[in-house]
Amino acid sequence: MLGNALDLLNAGLDAVQARLAWVATDTVNWKFYLQVCSWSVCLFESYLLLRQFPLYSKTEPPPVLAEHFKPDTFVKSQAYGKDKAKFSLVSGLYKQVVDSAFLQYGLMAWSWKIGGSITALLGYGPEYEILQSIAFAFTLFFVSSLPSLPLSYYQTFVLEEKHGFNKSTRSLFVTDLIKSWAIGLAIGAPFLAGFLSVFKWAGNRFVPWLMAFLLIFQLSMVVLYPTVIQPLFNKLSPLPAGELRSRIEELAVKLKFPLKHLYEIDGSKRSSHSNAYFFGLPGNKHIVIFDTLIKQSKPEEVEAVLAHELGHWYYMHPSQLLLLSQIHIFTILALFPAFLRAPPLLRAFDFPASVAVKPPTIVAFLLYQMLLTPLEAVVGILMNAVSRKFEYQADRFACELQTQLKDEKMADMGDRLARALVTLHVENLSTVWVDWLYSAYHHSHPTLTERLRALESSKGSVVAAKDAAEKKEL
Ligand SMILES: [Zn+2]
């Protein structure tokens, strides 16, 4: 049964590959194509920012938000938005110029050479492809991330500082950077070695095996990230007993949410932006709440935020997103074999003929990924649309808890959630006026105005349903 399915899959993949056979033989000016594509994406993003920019000059909040925003808070939020937009415009163009120069002058081919020198220094020859691939990947990553360091320094210590959000220090900034590079190496090296070994072992039939490998990796990160990685940066402590804790535990019991641990995280160490989330494998879930959220909102409002989060769990949104990402990965891998052994592709990106004749897997894969950038932008828009639908659904879930759990205490859940969202928005000085196209491209969440409007209407429908039920009882 499984054997038949695999045969069918492989026959389909072979057919795709036959259609793309020209990639391995034809000389195409891939570099030019990629320059055009990446500049198009960059200019489109700049255009979106220019559409959004005039909205920061509006002097009044949207009517639905008027009562929640004090005039001076609104002025602050507009100023913050304007500064962020300017920063995005300048940094986006700067990064594009740097990336474009790297592309033009063959950074990848250079990194492969350096990777080879590093492996040779360690006493291994070019036949150790996996070792050279790891050295190559880190050289490439390191060199290409250097130019954006000043940007992230500016963002933290000038932009966020100016608007009162930055809580990080220079030494924290540097240790964070070193830690994240060390973790990248500690996780990235074995990951890459595993990834390339699967290719080597499975040959042309790598698609199902590589998908299984990536899925196992994703699932182990779900376990490793919060237990091993996040504690290196933040302190997670059990949420102290009290009103908030009992409210959340009670809610979890009522919804049969398998809550294992309830944490408070010291997000305020770096920034005063706030949040809450849950994670974990089925049957073993953890909830994390930012100390900033606890400080800014009342316990009953934080409970409403958690009700929204549990809505994501109830409707299995994380699993659905995982499924979508599997489909996405499958599509990418299915088209990849055509690019795997394509000397003209490597030649187009300045690799010497000696390397191009037998393309290293990692190089072929990264080049192929780069060629997909414009398609990935479209995928991003679609994923945002899905994610926004999920947000509305989770909001409605919180609103309807009263009916679902037959608990009168939850009658005002919609109002509490609305208050919490408004507080989050006000405290984070989030943008209130949003251009629709900008939002479709960049936002995974509906705007505050959209969410409040939807909450208002689902509150209406909950009341109508309740009235109808009462009438029936009469
Ligand atoms: Zn959500």
Image (tube, helix red, strand yellow):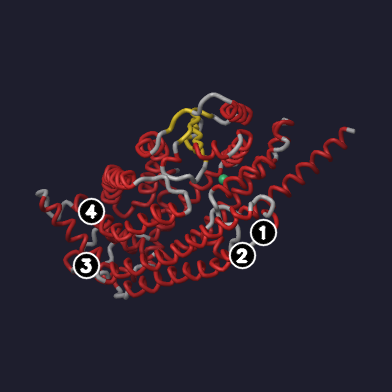
Amino acid on which the number 4 mark rests in the picture: Ser
6 vs 462, left or right, is left
Residue displayed at 53% across by 67% down = 53
**Mark 3 vs mark 2: in front:** 2
Do the residues under discs 2 and 4 have CB atoms within 8 angstroms? no
> Can you tell me whether the CB of the residue at mark 4 lies under 8 Å from the nearest atom of ligand 1?
no
Confirm or deny contact between disc 3 and disc 2 (CB under 8 A): no
**Quadrant housing the N terminus:** top left
The mark that comes first in sequence, 4 or 1, is 1
Q: Is residue 10 left or right of residue 163?
A: left
- List the residue tagged with mark 4: 133
From the viewer's perspective, is 276 left or right of 354? right
As helix, strand or loop, the secondary structure at mark 1 comes to loop
Mark pair 1, 2: CA separation: 10 Å
Residue 62: which disc?
1
> Residue 363, percent across and down?
27, 60
Q: Type of residue at label 3?
A: Phe
User: Can you name the residue that lies furthest to the front here?
Assistant: 72
Report ligand 1 position as a quadrant.
Answer: top right
Per the model, the C-alpha gap separating discs 4 and 1 is 53 Å
- Could you tell me which secondary element the residue under label 4 belongs to? helix
Q: Quadrant of residue 432?
A: bottom right
Q: Amino acid at mark 2?
A: Lys
- Between disc 4 and disc 1, the foreground one is 1
Q: Few, some or many C-alpha atoms within 10 Å of disc 1 (few <14, some 14-19, many ≥20)? A: few
Mark 4 near mark 3, Cβ–Cβ under 8 Å? no
Which marked residue is nearer to the observer: mark 1 or mark 3? 1
> Is tag 4's residue or tag 3's residue first in the polypeptide sequence?
4
Disc 1 residue type (three-letter): Pro
Percent coordinates x, y for residue 353 in the rendering? 18, 69
